[in-house]
C-alpha cells in the first residue's frame, strides 16, 4: 500500500509497536542498573542514540554518559580531543594565564597608586617635581657645554695661531682639542637622554592621572592636572631625527651639517666626523648651532640632532624664543626628512 503503515488492533501501527518494544527494553535495562553498574548512553556515527550496560570499544573515545536508575544523566565523558585541539587548548590556557597575570599586576599597581596619593594635587606635585629635577640636570649640562665651547674656541684659536706661524700642534694641544670635543659629544648625549626621560615621565604621570581618576571617580579634579610648565631649555628631542641604516644616516648627516652652516651666525669651531660646532654666541642676535650624530642605544640605528644656543643673558634668551629661532628648530626635522610623518613644513 505504497509504504503506508497497516492498521492493527486498536489502531496501533507496526511502527508504534516497535517503539514500545524499544522503550520497554530501555526500561528493563534501567531497572537493572542498580546492580549492573549504571546504564551507558552513546551516539553512533549515524547520530543514533544507544543504551547499554557497557560502551562498545569503537565508541570509548567518543562522547558518552552514564544514567541513574531514573534515566537521569549523572556522569558525562566528552570525546577525546585531537592533537590539534590539545595544542589549541594548551595555547588558550597559556593566554588565559598571561591575562590573569596582567590583571593581577594591574590590581597591584592600582593599590600602590591609591596608597601613594590622596588626591590629584599630590600626583601633580610629584610629576612637576620630577620634571623640575630633570630640567635642572639639563640646565647644568647646558652650562657645562657653554664652558666647553669657550674652551674649544680657545684651543682652536691656539691651533690657528700655530698654523699661521708654521708650527705644528703639540701632542698636548691636540689632546686638548680631542678631549674637549669628546666632552661636548658626551654632554649632548646626556642631555638627549634626559629629554627622553622627561618625555617618558610626563607620559607615565599622564597615565597615572587618568587611572587615578578612573579608580576615584568622585575625587576632586585638580585645576593644574593638565598644565605642564614649559622648560627654560627647548626640548632637544624635537630636533632629533632617527635614521636606521648607515647610508640613510650618512645622507641626513650631510644635510644636517649644511643646515647648521646656513643658519648659524658664528663661525665653525669644530667640524669632525660625528659633530659640528660653531663658536659660542657673543652678541645679542648670535646663533650658535651644534649638530651631532649619536648612536641610538634604545631604538637602534642613530639619531642626528641639533642644539641652538643664544647669548646667555636676558635679551639673548628672549631672542632664542623668537619666531626666527623657533623656525630654525622647527624646520630642522623637515629639512632632514621632508616625507617623515612628524616633519614640519
Image (spheres, grey):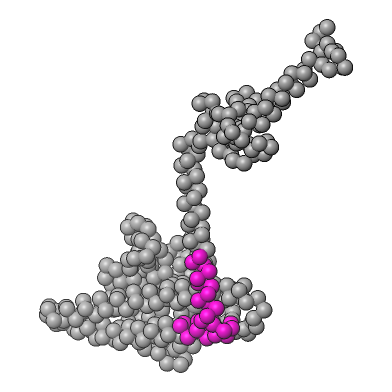
Q: Residue at x 49, y 88 (%)?
A: 318
Q: Is residue 28 above or below residue 191?
A: above
- Residue at the spot 71% in from the left edge and 25% down from the top edge: 24
Q: Is residue 253 left or right of residue 51?
A: left
Residue 53, compared with residue 278, is above or below; it is: above
Q: Position of residue 48 (x, y in %)?
A: 65, 25
- On-image quarter of the N terminus: top right
* Magenta region, main secondary structure: helix
Looking at the picture, how far across and down is residue 284, in whole percent?
43, 89
Report the front residue among 48 and 260: 48
Q: Nearer the viewer, residue 207 or 184?
A: 207
Q: Work out whether residue 260 can be spotted.
A: no
Q: Which residue sits at x=26%, y=86%?
A: 151
**For the magenta stretch, what is the residue range?**
104-131
Q: At 57% from the left edge and 84% from the top edge, which residue is drawn?
A: 118
**Of residues 24 and 299, the one drawn nearer to the viewer in this rendering:** 24
Tell whether position 114 is magenta: yes
Amino acid at each position: 500500500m505504497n509504504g503506508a503503515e497497516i492498521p492493527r488492533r486498536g489502531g496501533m501501527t507496526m511502527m508504534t509497536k516497535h517503539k514500545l518494544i524499544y522503550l520497554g527494553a530501555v526500561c528493563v535495562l534501567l531497572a537493572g542498573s542498580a546492580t549492573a553498574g549504571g546504564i551507558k548512553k552513546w551516539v553512533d556515527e549515524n547520530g543514533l542514540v544507544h543504551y547499554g550496560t557497557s560502551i562498545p570499544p569503537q565508541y570509548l573515545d567518543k562522547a558518552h554518559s552514564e544514567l541513574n536508575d531514573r534515566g537521569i544523566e549523572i556522569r558525562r565523558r566528552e570525546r577525546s580531543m585531537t592533537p590539534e585541539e590539545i595544542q589549541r587548548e594548551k595555547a588558550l590556557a597559556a593566554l588565559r594565564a598571561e591575562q590573569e597575570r596582567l590583571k593581577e599586576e594591574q590590581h597591584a599597581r592600582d593599590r600602590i597608586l591609591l596608597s601613594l596619593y590622596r588626591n590629584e594635587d599630590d600626583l601633580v606635585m610629584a610629576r612637576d617635581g620630577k620634571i623640575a629635577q630633570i630640567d635642572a640636570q639639563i640646565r647644568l649640562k647646558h652650562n657645562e657645554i657653554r664652558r666647553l665651547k669657550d674652551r674649544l674656541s680657545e684651543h682652536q684659536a691656539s691651533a690657528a695661531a700655530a698654523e699661521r706661524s708654521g708650527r705644528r700642534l703639540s701632542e698636548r694641544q691636540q689632546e686638548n682639542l680631542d678631549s674637549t670635543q669628546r666632552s661636548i659629544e658626551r654632554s649632548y648625549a646626556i642631555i638627549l637622554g634626559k629629554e627622553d626621560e622627561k618625555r617618558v615621565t610626563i607620559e607615565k604621570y599622564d597615565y597615572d592621572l587618568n587611572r587615578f581618576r578612573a579608580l576615584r571617580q568622585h575625587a576632586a579634579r585638580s585645576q593644574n592636572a593638565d598644565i605642564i610648565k614649559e622648560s627654560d631649555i627647548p626640548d632637544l628631542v624635537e630636533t632629533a631625527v632617527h635614521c636606521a641604516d648607515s647610508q640613510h644616516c650618512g645622507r641626513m648627516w650631510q644635510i644636517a651639517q649644511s643646515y647648521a652652516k646656513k643658519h648659524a651666525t658664528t663661525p665653525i669651531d669644530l667640524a669632525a666626523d660625528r659633530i659640528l660646532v660653531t663658536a659660542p654666541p657673543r652678541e645679542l642676535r648670535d646663533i650658535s648651532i651644534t649638530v651631532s650624530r649619536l648612536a641610538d642605544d634604545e631604538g637602534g640605528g642613530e639619531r642626528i640632532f641639533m642644539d641652538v644656543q643664544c647669548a646667555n643673558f636676558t635679551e639673548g634668551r628672549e631672542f632664542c624664543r623668537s619666531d626666527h629661532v623657533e623656525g630654525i628648530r622647527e624646520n630642522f626635522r623637515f629639512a632632514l626628512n621632508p616625507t617623515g610623518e612628524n616633519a614640519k613644513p
